[in-house]
Image (spheres, rainbow, N blue to C red):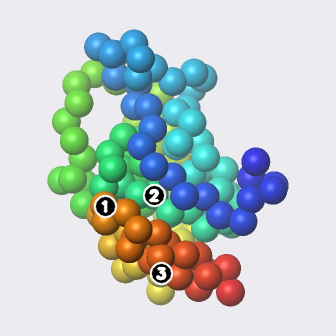
């Protein structure tokens, strides 16, 4: 998908909570986290909408778009979850510094339609 995409907008996502079998992800990395990694490695824009929770929230934290204090305590998770987020953190320098404030605002935004316009504007700027 990365080869045919111009950007990645991520929302929600499984977190591998051990007490909740329906939250298990397949493979070593949650899909949302893997999508963020592939996009950033390919130099594509990646917009994590962290206000809606899930793995996307943790991606936003790993990218320093949300403060670590905004991580939600969840209990025990699959052992590869934190390692996959560390890989995301290693890619935080792939985000243009000039766009960090706008990305941080979007990571903490849950306004729906107004946020969609802000995402479109950010992508236009990132891809120009």
Q: Classify mark 3: residues with Cα within 10 Å, few (<14), some (14-19) or many (20+).
A: few
Q: Secondary structure at mark 2?
A: strand
Q: Name which quarter of the figure residue 79 lies in.
A: top left
The mark found on residue 51 in the picture is none
Measured in 3D between alpha carbons, the distance from the residue under mark 3 to the one under mark 2, in whole angstroms, is 13 Å
Residue highlighted by disc 1: 110
The residue identified by callout 2 is 48
In the picture, measured across the screen, residue 102 lies left or right of residue 1, that is: left
Q: Residues within 10 Å of mark 2 (few under 14, many from 20)?
A: many
Image spot of residue 12 (x, y percent)? 42, 43
Residue at screen point 57% across, 36% down: 31
The quarter of the image holding the C terminus is: bottom right
Label 3: which residue?
99
Who comes first in sequence, dot 3 or dot 1? 3
Picture quadrant of residue 19: top left
84 lies left or right of 112? right
Compute the Cα span from label 3 to label 1: 19 Å
Q: Are marks 3 and 1 in contact (CB under 8 Å)?
A: no
Q: At 47% across and 76% down in the image, what residue appears?
A: 117
């Amino acid at each position: 998908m990365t080869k045919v995409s111009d950007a990645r907008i991520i929302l929600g996502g499984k977190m591998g909570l051990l007490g909740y079998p329906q939250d298990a992800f397949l493979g070593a990395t949650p899909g949302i986290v893997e999508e963020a990694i592939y996009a950033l490695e390919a130099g594509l824009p990646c917009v994590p909408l962290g206000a809606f929770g899930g793995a996307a929230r943790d991606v936003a934290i790993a990218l320093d778009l949300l403060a670590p204090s905004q991580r939600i305590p969840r209990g025990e998770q699959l052992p590869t979850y934190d390692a996959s987020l560390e890989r995301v953190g290693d890619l935080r320098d792939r985000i243009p510094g000039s766009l960090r404030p706008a990305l941080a605002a979007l990571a903490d935004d849950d306004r729906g339609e107004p946020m969609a316009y802000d995402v479109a504007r950010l992508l236009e700027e990132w891809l120009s």
